[in-house]
Image (cartoon, helix red, strand yellow):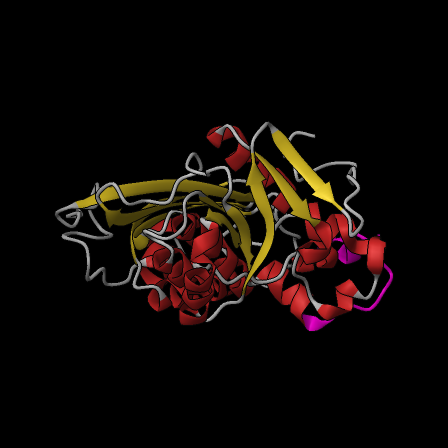
């Protein structure tokens, strides 16, 4: 099998929302009039972002899910993606399973694959995604206001706990939901769209809740008080108390949404979560100042060893 046979068999699909998809020197797309275009790229590298023995179908799912999560964070409707693969060798069974996971998630969100590249090299996956929001309406990181509530979707810490267990650092038995969260995260696209015009600042939680919320605070020029006990997680992790606190507050790989909104809009935020089919939890408050304070049940500041994941740490 040649490189071009691999592309033709497994990565060439109809692109109904593009003028021209895979097969030419460049794709042609036509953005919706009155919309802003969003572009985001993520790279996954074997040994850094995933284990060598990961199920390729799950890897295909996650490779797209992390990009969809970026669109969700801005309230964008995902439209098109490009996919670039560096492969150690041409393995058709692997490619078929990877493509199945990737295209199933793409179809679920109405996304067309419109191009990409393949080459030989250490297993590396790079996806660029394009999405749209009504002009000037996107959710951004720089719009948090003093007095806003801080919210987060879903549950935190599950993926980080699964990773620690795979690394042999967590001997306890974990629920299946933890591995599912690590290998098949569910991007909160519907929630992001439901928050347009309602939330102020937003981003997706990929490197750890504390680190990612800190990006909102820095960009908005504000501070936040967050109640550690309010951070939502799986009951099995909650039962471990402080053992998994770092996973919940700073573990990363959650791909949930963290956002701020006016306190008066609490009922509307809860309703938006219900409409999108995902729980949302109020976990803190935006205050004047700089930085993030993590508070325990007694109101004392809790110091974490680190706030989140750093690729170069």
- Main SS of the magenta segment? loop
Residue 2 image offset from top left, x and y in percent: 39, 52
In this rendering, the answer to whether 230 lies above or below 201 is below
Identify the image quadrant of the C terminus.
top right
Instruction: Using the image as rendered, state which of residue 297 and residue 125 is in the foreground.
Output: 297
Q: Which residues are magenta?
A: 163-176
> Does the stretch in magenta take in 165?
yes
Q: Residue furthest right?
A: 171
Relative to the observer, which residue lies in front, 154 or 91?
154
Q: Tell me, yes or no, if residue 122 can be seen here.
A: no
Horizontal arrangement in the rendering, residue 189 relative to residue 138 (left or right): right
Asked if one can make out residue 302 in the rendered structure from this viewpoint, the answer is yes
Q: Which residue is at a point 74% across and 57% down the rendered structure image?
A: 161
Q: Is residue 224 left or right of residue 260?
A: right
Eyeballing the image, is 158 above or below 50? Answer: below
Residue 44 forms part of the magenta stretch: no
With 290 as the anchor, is 111 left or right in this view?
Answer: left
Residue 309: image location, x then y, percent: 66, 39
Q: Which quadrant would residue 11 be assigned to in this image?
A: bottom left
Give the x, y percent position of residue 193: 35, 57
Q: Is residue 118 left or right of residue 229?
A: left
Q: Residue at x 50, y 67 (%)?
A: 278
């Amino acid at each position: 099998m040649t490189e071009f046979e691999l592309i033709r068999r497994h990565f060439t699909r109809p692109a109904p929302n593009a003028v021209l998809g895979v097969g030419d020197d460049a794709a042609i797309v036509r953005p919706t009039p009155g919309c802003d275009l969003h572009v985001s790229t993520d790279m996954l590298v074997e040994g850094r972002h995933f284990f060598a023995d990961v199920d390729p179908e799950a890897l295909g799912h996650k490779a797209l899910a992390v990009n969809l999560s970026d669109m969700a964070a801005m309230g964008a409707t995902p439209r098109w993606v490009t996919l670039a693969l560096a492969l150690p060798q041409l393995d058709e069974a692997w490619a078929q399973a990877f493509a199945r996971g990737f295209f199933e998630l793409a179809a679920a969100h109405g996304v067309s694959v419109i191009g990409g590249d393949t080459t030989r090299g250490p297993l590396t996956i790079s996806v660029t995604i394009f999405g749209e929001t009504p002009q000037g309406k996107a959710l951004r990181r720089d719009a948090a206001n003093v007095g806003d509530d801080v919210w987060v979707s879903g549950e935190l810490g599950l993926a980080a706990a699964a990773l620690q267990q795979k690394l042999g650092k967590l001997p306890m038995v974990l629920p299946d939901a933890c591995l599912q969260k690590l290998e098949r995260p569910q991007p909160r696209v519907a929630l992001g769209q439901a928050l347009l015009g309602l939330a102020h600042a937003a981003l997706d939680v990929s490197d750890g809740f504390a680190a990612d919320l800190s990006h909102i605070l820095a960009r908005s020029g504000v501070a936040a008080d967050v109640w550690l006990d309010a951070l939502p997680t799986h009951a099995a992790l909650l039962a471990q108390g402080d053992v998994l606190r770092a996973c919940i507050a700073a573990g990363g790989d959650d791909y949930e949404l963290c956002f701020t909104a006016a306190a008066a809009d609490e009922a509307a935020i809860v309703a938006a979560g219900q409409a999108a089919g995902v729980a949302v939890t109020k976990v803190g408050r935006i205050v004047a100042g700089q930085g993030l304070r993590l508070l325990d049940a007694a109101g004392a500041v809790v110091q974490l060893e680190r706030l989140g994941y750093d690729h170069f740490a």
